[in-house]
Image: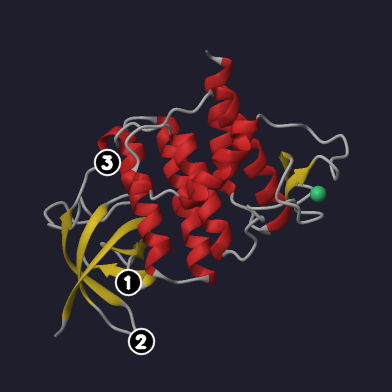
Amino acid sequence: MQIKKIKGIIIKETYYKESSKILTILTKEYGKIGVLSKGCRNIKNKLRIVSTKLTYGIFDIYYKEDGLSLLVDVEILDELKSIKNDLSKIGYLTYLLDLASQVMENYNNEEVFNILESAILKINSSFDPMIITNIVEIKYLSFLGVLPVLDKCSKCGKTTDLITINADAGGYLCKDCYNQEYIVDIKTIKLIKMFYYVDISKIKELNITDKNKYEINEFLENYYNQYTGLYLKSKNFLNQINTELFQNK
Ligand SMILES: [Zn+2]
C-alpha cells in the first residue's frame, strides 16, 4: 500500500454510507481529487474533526489513480482562524475556492494552487480580502485564456497616452480610441498591471486607496462577466454579504 503526502484544502464534503464522507480536495500536485474518509462521522474517529470543508493541510492519502483514494491522516498546516471567524472573509475564501476549482478544470498546474494558497494565507493574516481576491482574479485570467492586454491600447495597440481601462473594450484605451467610457484614476491603470506580476506570497503591505480598489474590483467583475463564461454562485453570495456590510456601516 502506497501512501502519498498531498498538500491541499477541502472544498466539499458529501455524506457517504452510514458513517463516512467523500471529501473533494483541491491539491497542489493532483488538481481536484475525491477522497473517502472512512468512518469519519463516528464520534471517536480520529478523522472526524479534519474531514470538514476548509481544512487546509498535508493529507496522507492511499492514492489510487483509477478509483476512490482513501484518507489515512491529516496534518493541519493552518487552522485559518481569522478567516473562519469573519463572515465576509469566509465569503471571499469560498469564492476563491470555487474559482480555483473552475480554473483547475481547464488548467491543472501547481501554479493555480500556489496562487490560491498564498492568497488564503494573506487573507488569513488580515490583508484586505478584496484586493487579494482581485490579484488572484487577474492572474487566473491568463489560465482561462482571456487575459486583457496589459501593455498597450486594446484597440489600436499604441503604448502611450493610455487613459483608462474598460471591460467592454477588453483592456486599456488610449486617448485617441477613447469614446466616453468611464475614466479610471491613473493609478488604477498601473495597479492592474502590477497585480498581474506581483508574487502574492511576497506582499508586505498594500497601500491602495478605496477609489483605486473599487475601480479595479469593478473592472474585474465586468471583465469576468463578459469574457470568462463562468457563473459562480459563491460570487453572488459574496456580493450579497458585501452589500449588507456596506449598508450596516
Ligand atoms: Zn488606441
The residue pinned by badge 3 equals: 80
- Quadrant placement of the N terminus: bottom left
Drawn side of residue 219 relative to residue 183, left or right: left
**Crowdedness near tag 3: few (<14), some (14–19) or many (≥20) residues, C-alpha within 10 Å:** some
Query: Residue 245, position in %: x, y?
Result: 52, 21
Q: Secondary structure at mark 2?
A: loop
Residue located farthest toward the front when viewing the structure as drawn: 160
Q: Where residue 186 sits: x, y (%)? A: 65, 32
Residue at 82% x, 36% y is: 181
Q: Identify the residue under disc 2.
A: 66
Residue at figure coordinates x 38%, y 47% from the top left: 200
Type of amino acid under label 1: Glu
First in residue order: circle 2 vs circle 3: 2
Earlier sequence position, callout 2 versus callout 1: 1
- Please tell me how crowded label 1 is: few (under 14), some (14-19), or many (20+) other residues with Cα within 10 Å: some
Q: Nearer the viewer, mark 2 or mark 3?
A: 3
Q: Earlier in the sequence, mark 3 or mark 1?
A: 1
Position of 232 relative to 16 (above/below): above
Specify the label residue 142 is tagged with.
Answer: none
- C-beta proximity under 8 Å, tags 3 and 1: no
In whole angstroms, how far apart are the C-alphas of marks 2 and 3? 32 Å
Q: Nearer the viewer, mark 3 or mark 1?
A: 1
Real-space Cα separation, disc 2 to disc 1, in angstroms: 16 Å
Along the line of sight, which residue is nearer the eye, 97 or 224?
Answer: 224
> Disc 1 on helix, strand or loop?
loop
Residue 29's label in the rendered image is 1
At horizontal 43% and vertical 48% (from top left) the residue drawn is 198
For this orientation, the residue located farthest to the top is 249
Q: Position of residue 179 (x, y in %)?
A: 88, 39
- Disc 2, disc 3: CB below 8 Å? no
Residue closest to the eye, 20 or 205: 205
